[in-house]
Amino acid sequence: MWGRIDGLRVLELGAPGEMRRQLTDLTLAGVKRATAGLLELDYHAENEPLEHVGERLALVDDSGAKVAELEVVDVQLVPFAEVTWEFAEAEGEGFRSVDHWRDAHRRYWAAEGHEVDASTTVVCLHYRLVSD
């Protein structure tokens, strides 16, 4: 189950440490407007429902402190092989192509102990910064 702050579900970006700090900074700067999760790993295994449009999330930093409030503007379930360039670009992490996005995410999830294939369901979450 995900943490809660001020009644809002917590959003932690990436792995703790430098990755989380960078992704949080990109979000606070308005560059990162989307993030990807795995339906099975991040939702089913955590017994969490999907986010919904209009839901507010508490973005936390590497120490677990709330640094901003985000509003969900779109949620899509997409097979890994069908994630679009538009989504990859909205992640704001400097991907050069959708193939670059797929390679980086495949490595990230493998390091987390979860192999993905073309049919693995990805939760493509778009959000906007409401307050910081």
Image (spheres, rainbow, N blue to C red):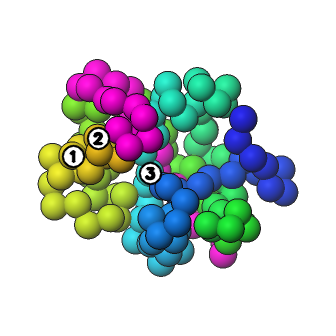
| Mark pair 2, 1: CA separation | 5 Å
Give the residue number, with chain letter if any, for mark 1.
103
Residue 93 lies in what quarter of the image? bottom left
Under mark 3, the amino acid is Thr
Task: State which quarter of the image contains the C terminus.
Answer: bottom right
Question: Magenta stretch?
Answer: 109-132
Is 56 positioned to the left or the right of 111 in the image? Answer: right
Secondary structure beneath label 1: helix
Identify the amino acid type marked 2: Arg
Residue under pointer 2: 106
The location of residue 73, given as percent across then percent down, is 52, 50
User: Which residue is rendered at x = 26% and y = 66% of the image?
Assistant: 94
Residue 111: in magenta span? yes
Marks 1,3: beta carbons within 8 A = no
Look at label 1 and name its amino acid. Asp
Q: Nearer the viewer, residue 70 or 118?
A: 118
Instruction: Give neighbour class at mark 1: few <14, some 14-19, many 20+ (Cα, 10 Å).
Output: few
| Residue 37 highlighted magenta (yes or no) | no
Residue hosting label 3: 35
Give the x, y percent position of residue 111: 38, 43
State the image coordinates of residue 26 (x, y, percent, origin top left).
44, 72
Q: Quadrant of residue 78?
A: top left
Give the label, 1 or 3, closer to the camera.
Answer: 1
Residue that sits furthest to the right in the current view: 6
Numbered tag placed on residue 55 in the rendering: none
Q: Are marks 3 and 2 in contact (CB under 8 Å)?
A: no
The answer to whether mark 2 and mark 1 are in CB contact below 8 A is yes
User: Which residue is found at the position 23% from the left and 60% from the top?
Assistant: 95
For marks 3 and 2, give the CA distance.
Answer: 14 Å
* Residue 10 sits above or below residue 39 on the image: below
Q: Is residue 14 visible?
A: yes
